[in-house]
Image: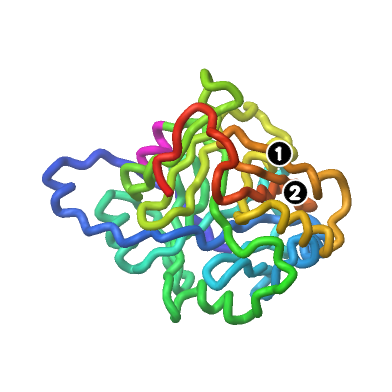
Amino acid sequence: MRVFLLLCFTFVSSATLSAQAARPKITGIAFMRVYTTDATAAERFYGKTLGLSETRSAGTEQFVVNRHQWIEVLANSAPPNPTTRMAAIAFTTNSVSQMASYLASRAITAIDSSQAGELAVYDPEGNLVVFVQSGPSGPEAKAANEAALSASATSHRIIHVGFIVHNRAKEDAFWREVLGFRPYWYGGMTPAKTEWVSLQVPDGTDWLEYMLGGSATPDLRETGVLDHFSLGTASMNTVLAQLQKNGCEGKDCTAIQVGKDGKIQLNLFDPDQTRVEYMEFQPAMQPCCSPFTGP
C-alpha cells in the first residue's frame, strides 16, 4: 500500500505565479474508491442491486458505470479508521504529466506518480485525490474495456462526489484557487445556514460537494451519509423500475424525495453505509438558497 505525505501549501509571489506551469484540463469524475468489510455483500450490492459490471485487479473490485467512470471497492484492505469508508476520489485529466508539473509549480509537494497513468495528492484535509489520464491509453479506458457495460445498470453516469469538510477556506485554496473548480450551487436545510457547497470541475459539468456541519466525532452512519457519490438519471422512474428488476428490497428502494436543490433523489446504502445518491439531472422545482451557476 502506497504511503503519502500530507500536502504542504505555501504562499507564492506574483513573480512566481507568472512562471507557473499551465493547468491541464480536469474534465470530470473518474471514480470513487471505498473500503468494505464484507466483500461478498459489497459485490452483491454494486453488481446485483446497482447492476454494474465488475472487474478485479490486485484486491480491488471495479464496478464500471460507463466507459470513463467506475466505482472501486477495496476488498482486501482493512479501513484505517473504523468510522470512515471513503478511500479516494478521482478526476480525469488530459495530461497527468502536465498536472504533476502544474502542482509542483504551485508549491504542492508529496505528489505520487508511481501508478501508471495516475497522479495522487492529498487535499488540505487529508482526502486522497487521484488524477487519471484520459484517452485510449489511460486507466479509464483499460477499466472500461475489461467489462462490458451492464444492461441491468440503474445508471450510467456519476455526476458528483461529496465528502466531509471542516474548513471551507482551506479546501477552497486547493479546489478553487489551485485546481480551478467553479461554484455551482450552495444550500442547507434552511436558507440561513450553508451545509452543502457544490463546485464543478473546470472543464466539464461533474461536481464535488463539500459536506459541512458534520458532528465532531461522527459515527459510521453519519460518515457514510456525508462521504457519498451520486448517480445521475434523466428520470427517477427508470431507476425505480430497474431497482425492482434487480431485486432491491426495503423501503429505501422506493423512497424518492426532492432535495433542497430542487432535484428528485433516492438514497441507497452499501453494506458499509456508504451512500449512493440517485439524482435527476434537471431540477423539478426551484432550488433553495442559491441558483445554479452552471449547466
Q: Position of residue 248 (x, y in %)?
A: 84, 56
Magenta segment: 169-173
Residue at image point 62% right, 56% down: 233
Q: Position of residue 198 (x, y in %)?
A: 48, 40
* Foreground of the two, 166 or 160: 160
* Foreground of the two, 71 or 241: 241
Q: Amino acid at mark 2?
A: Leu
Q: Is residue 60 among the parts visible in the rendering?
A: no
Q: Which residue is mark 1?
A: 257
Magenta-drawn stretch contains 241 = no
Q: Is residue 241 left or right of residue 12?
A: right
Disc 1: CA contacts within 10 A as few (<14), some (14-19) or many (>=20): few
Question: Overall secondary structure of the magenta stretch?
Answer: helix
Q: Amino acid at mark 1?
A: Gln
Q: Is residue 269 among the parts visible in the rendering?
A: yes
Q: Is residue 51 above or below residue 143?
A: above
Residue at image point 56% right, 42% down: 283
